[in-house]
Image (cartoon, rainbow, N blue to C red):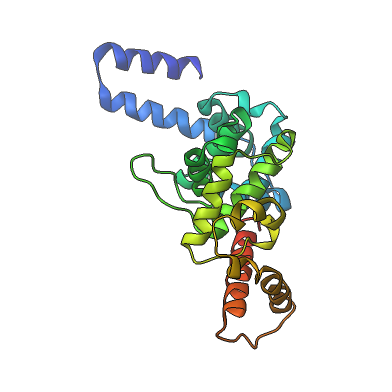
Amino acid sequence: MPSDIAQKLMDAHMVGDQQAIQAIQAQVAKMVEDAAPKPSGDDAFKIRTIFSDDSASAIKMYDFMNERFGADWYDWELETIERMLFIEYGVSLEDINRDKLFAIRHVCRSDGCFSDWFEFNQVALSFAGCIADFECLRAPSPGMLINAVKTVKHIRPDRNGEFGIDVEKYLCVAFINDGIYCPPPSLFDWLKDRFKAMVHVPTSNMWQDILKRSREIIQGSRDIEENPVDIQAARIVRTELAALSYQG
């Protein structure tokens, strides 16, 4: 801060002139903003897309932070992260992406979401752009859950995709509550044993037919009929596509 502005701010504090204090602080904030590097071209578009779009991918946001600030950025204080983004790239985080970025930081620093179903629930909401609410429980959609699994695995490869029993059970119950009685293809090998214990035998006996039908739907089949196999196949395809939309 230039010495003359610092002196004016001190004088304003000394006499308790709140209007002058606010005006000087606004002037300083404008100077900082003007001095911040302004990315240009494709780089500017990329940064604006990541941090200004509420639907920005948590995976891309994590990769960006690692690339630009190094692998230890998540050890910074929250205020430091926001300040560095603003100073280096002129980025001012809004509520949704601030919550998403801080959820990423939390997963980097804690193993909680791998074993605690409630913590996984909150992370899934944040990664999908739904600010986590710790006063009332909200359930992520099936697509949000798949996205959370993929994102957490990407952020923490050191965990080798190992989740605790409570998280496994939570995922199975969440899918079943949404009318999905076959593990989605991307999670099938991981959840099939836990899932099988929660559905009727006739239902699990249809799984291979459901998976085969889902592949046909993905490949362009549109003649979906009102039978259990087609209905389940259509649901898991919609769920997988929804998950992909959060990673775009």
* Residue 229 sits above or below residue 181 on the image: below
Which residue is rendered at x = 48% and y = 14% of the image?
3
Q: Nearer the viewer, residue 247 or 25?
A: 247
Give residue 219's position: percent from left, percent from top: 75, 78
Q: Quadrant of residue 217?
A: bottom right
Q: Nearer the viewer, residue 12 or 232?
A: 232
Give residue 52's position: percent from left, percent from top: 55, 50
Which residue is rendered at x = 58% and y = 40% of the image?
165
Q: Is residue 113 left or right of residue 21?
A: right
Q: Is residue 95 left or right of residue 191?
A: left
Q: Residue furthest top?
A: 14
Give residue 184's position: percent from left, percent from top: 64, 62
Which residue is rendered at x = 61% and y = 59% of the image?
243
Q: Quadrant of residue 214?
A: bottom right
Whether residue 47 is visible here, answered yes or no, is no
* Residue 224 sits above or below residue 149 on the image: below
Q: Is residue 32 left or right of residue 229?
A: left
Whether residue 80 is visible here, answered yes or no, is yes
How many numbered marks have been drawn onto this rendered protein structure?
0
Q: Quadrant of residue 34?
A: top right
* Residue 228 sits above or below residue 62 on the image: below
Q: Nearer the viewer, residue 204 or 215?
A: 204
Q: If the image is split into quadrants, where does the C terminus sit?
A: bottom right
Q: Is residue 70 left or right of residue 118?
A: right
